[in-house]
Amino acid sequence: MAGKKDYVNSMVTSNRDQIEYHVREILKLIGEDVEREGLQETPARVARMYEEIFAGYEVDPREVLGVTFDEQHEELVIVKDIVYYSQCEHHMAPFFGKVHIGYIPSGKIVGLSKLARLVEAVSRKLQVQERITSQIADILMEELKPHGVMVVVDGEHLCMCARGVKKTGSKTVTSAVRGQFHGNAAARAEFMALIKD
């Protein structure tokens, strides 16, 4: 989570020695020479990376929304193309893409950068794309109590592109629809039209 509040996973920090030991053991088990120059610092680098990419475990996603503002704007608000990176909980392989969030306020709005922070808080842990999509929508409904929320997430999953079926370039798209977006095809269509490039 870039900006004022950079979070790190303190469990990783506390267990750095064990993580480095186990990474070293995994390298040996796949046939690597852990003493060769290129790998000597790899266990430490992996531990430092885990502090960052698993920082979501340190954050209550509801708290990143922070202060809300009373505003009588009741038209669609969209923040699109929020880039995210996560780790598939099935293979611990990266997946990444973009999140598009739209909501219809009912008297409360939130700072636009807070929506990007919410995406970071939810995605920086072992995840599945479907859960990321639903969690973002549900948290916004609970915290802002808007008339409706719609979230669309697209992702490219290395567990599908780089291994298994090896379908490079394939994308997964998930959506979550809450509140007024459920029964209002025109609102859904407006959101989808506005997030297109």
Image (spheres, grey):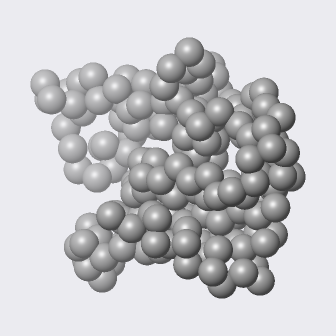
- Which residue is at the front of the view, 127 or 43? 127
Residue 138 appears in which quarter of the rendering?
A: bottom right
Task: Please tell me whether residue 25 is drawn above or below residue 80 in the rendered image.
Answer: above
In the image, is 38 to the left or to the right of 153? left
Outermost residue toward the left in this view? 37
Residue 175: image location, x then y, percent:
59, 72
Outermost residue toward the top in this view? 4
Q: Is residue 86 visible?
A: no
Q: What residue is at 28 percent from the left and 52 percent from the top?
A: 30
Q: What residue is at 65 percent from the left and 65 percent from the top?
A: 150
In the image, is 137 to the left or to the right of 53? right
- Which residue is at the front of the view, 7 or 51? 7
Quarter of the C terminus within the rendering: bottom left
Q: What residue is at 63 percent from the left and 47 percent from the top?
A: 122
Q: Is residue 146 visible?
A: yes
Residue 62: image location, x then y, percent:
78, 39
Task: Please tell me whether residue 71 is drawn above or below residue 187 in the rendered image.
Answer: above
Residue 60: image location, x then y, percent:
76, 36
